[in-house]
Image (cartoon, rainbow, N blue to C red):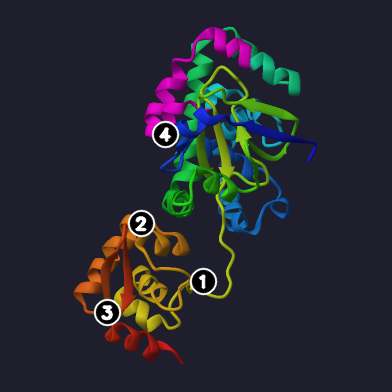
Amino acid sequence: MAGVLHVHFNDRDFRHVQLAPTADPLWETILGLHVAYTPAPLLPARLRPWHGRARRRLHQGDLRRTCRLLNGIAPPDAPYFPDFLTPAESEDGITAGLRTLRSTPATRLAREVRLAARHRPLPAWTRRLAAGDRTVLDDLADALHLVHDRLVAPDWSEIEATVAADRARQLDALEAGLPAVLATLDPFTWADPVLSAPYPVNSSLHLHGRGVRLVPSYFCHTTPIALADPGLPPVVVHPVRRRPAGPGTAPAAPRDAALAALLGASRARVLAALTGAAGTPTTGGVAARLGMPASSVSGHLTVLRRAGLAESERAGPHVVHRLTARGRHLLEADRP
């Protein structure tokens, strides 16, 4: 990697750090498009199955032509793409994000297109965009909407669950303070007061008391991404952290299909996660290990308690869960 990103904190910045609660649809759309056009051997193993599905989806209708339009201004290998493509309002959903994108001021369009042109040759149509042509801007917004619907949305539940698990780990780390959260971010290194990571170019982001919004992304890989304009509220998008399998990791699925048929696959996974789990089995901890939304885990635990297979009790600020004798017997009977 050619450079390093340095994010400089001061004491006031710690009061304004935001942990994005969900996946951001516009960031995931653009980064998902990058993954779709990256050769599979260059991707981490976790993204290769999705890459295969995405390549098949590219043959549907006019999607490939739409992707070419977006790749003209935000290609996978570019060290910079315009910040206006990922407005902060996208955190409220893709409709809100695209509404803001369509209203981008002409002066900002011109500035950011010129900056993109410094890094690589741009297609001829971007000159109209830089001149403030609203038709071209609407075409870009429509293209993002179509790519999100056709390429990304079919796997949105998996994306949200993975991001929710990452956020649960961040919230668990927050009990030891915000520096502990910063130390968990991949591929960053925290050395108070600077957060550093490999980056396509050398770049320093001085927060100046504004804090930063940290956005975990399913499709971000290798390096994080920061908004280039120092005048915008600071945003850093980073790869979700994948907990490696090992001793104490909850099984990914029940050992026998019969248990899944009895309880449902997801509920059976939650039940199995209550035995041999590393650490205290809180709702957030189980959700993080299984890559499921905490709300879904909570619902499954309610059903398991009513069936007499699990029990829960409050321990300080947390509610912890454990198998009952009946639940343990059911799991042991499932083992060969």
The residue identified by callout 3 is 309
- Tell me the amino acid under the disc marked 2: Ala
Was residue 110 drawn as part of the magenta stretch in this picture? yes
Instruction: Tell me the residue that label 2 is attached to.
Output: 294
Question: Which portion, as a residue range, is magenta?
Answer: 86-112
Distance from the alpha carbon under mark 3 to that under mark 2: 19 Å
**Residue displayed at 40% across by 22% down:** 99
Q: What residue do we see at 59% from left, 33% from top?
A: 65
Q: Residue furthest front?
A: 11
> Disc 4 versus disc 2: distance between alpha carbons?
19 Å
Query: Which of disc 1 and disc 2 is earlier in sequence?
Result: 1
Q: Residues within 10 Å of mark 4 (few under 14, many from 20)?
A: some
The verdict on residue 298 being magenta is no
Q: Callout 2: helix, strand or loop?
A: helix
User: Which kind of residue does numbered mark 4 sit on?
Assistant: Glu
Outermost residue, right side: 2
Q: Is residue 257 visible?
A: yes
Task: Point out which mark residue 249 bears.
Answer: 1
Q: Position of residue 301 (x, y in %)?
A: 28, 68
Q: Dividing the image into 4 quarters, which one contains the N terminus? A: top right
**In this rendering, does residue 80 appear at all?**
no
Q: Which residue is mark 4?
A: 91
User: Label 1, label 4: how many angstroms apart (C-alpha)?
Assistant: 31 Å
Which label's residue is closer to the chain start, 3 or 4? 4
Classify 10 Å Cα crowding around label 3: few (below 14), some (14-19), many (20 and above).
many
